[in-house]
Image (cartoon, rainbow, N blue to C red):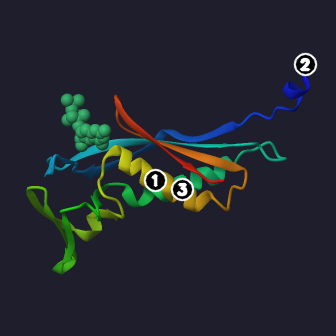
Amino acid sequence: MTAVQASARPLVQARVGGAGWDFNAAHTGLHDGVFEPLHGHTYHVVLAAWGLPDASGMVADFRVLKQQLREAIAPLKRRTLIAADTPGVLVEETGGGQMRVTGGGACFSLPRSWTALLPITGTSTEALACYLVAELARRLGAACPAVERLELMLTESAECSATAEAVLR
Ligand SMILES: Nc1nc2c(c(=O)[nH]1)N=C([C@H](O)[C@H](O)COP(=O)(O)OP(=O)(O)OP(=O)(O)O)CN2
């Protein structure tokens, strides 16, 4: 074995989520400036944390990763996902606890409590994966010092998914 091989410390991926981590949410995507009809998905989420294992042999404690992933997806569960910053679309809270979305050839109103209003420009699977990985980077950056990179894979159907990456250090 060469000196290089003997001292190599491989980057390791710790992964949580997958089976049992599905959540339901509704959304509408803007395609060529037009909203498609509101519809739902059963999203499936996997979080991977890459890093050099610490002295205890862990990249990050699975319990911490699971807790933070659980908390990040909790506000999205069984909600209609609304992108607050969609160009050309007005999102406003109206009286009586209602939320109104106007633009993209549509106008719809929902109880505010049925929605998750997100600081993003659209609710594509890619945009949602980016939102979640940024949220997790914010939560895990200090708590998991061995983690160098996070990957969040969000699946909306058997054939469609998106993976977003955040570099922590
Ligand atoms: N790159 C992306 N493309 C599309 C997204 C997306 O999030 N990222 N989203 C949609 C639609 O919003 C919808 O969620 C999926 O559309 P589609 O694959 O057509 O789904 P259907 O189940 O309606 O279609 P089938 O024909 O039954 O497969 C579109 N594109």
Q: Quadrant of ligand 1?
A: top left
Q: Disc 1 designates what residue? A: 132
Picture residue at 65% right of the left edge, 47% below the top: 62
The vertical placement of 134 against 22, above or below, is below
* Amino acid residing under circle 3: Leu
Q: Which mark is residue 136?
A: 3
* Amino acid residing under circle 2: Met
Q: Disc 2 designates what residue? A: 1
State how far apart marks 1 and 2 are (Cα). 42 Å
Proximity of marks 1 and 3: CB atoms separated by less than 8 Å: yes
Picture residue at 40% right of the left edge, 61% below the top: 75
Give the mark nearest the N terminus, 1 or 2.
2
Mark 2 vs ligand 1: CB under 8 Å?
no
Instruction: In the displayed orientation, state which residue is furthest to the top.
Output: 1
The image shows residue 131 at horizontal and vertical percentages of 43, 55
Q: Dot 3 lies on which element?
A: helix
Mark 1 vs ligand 1: CB under 8 Å?
no
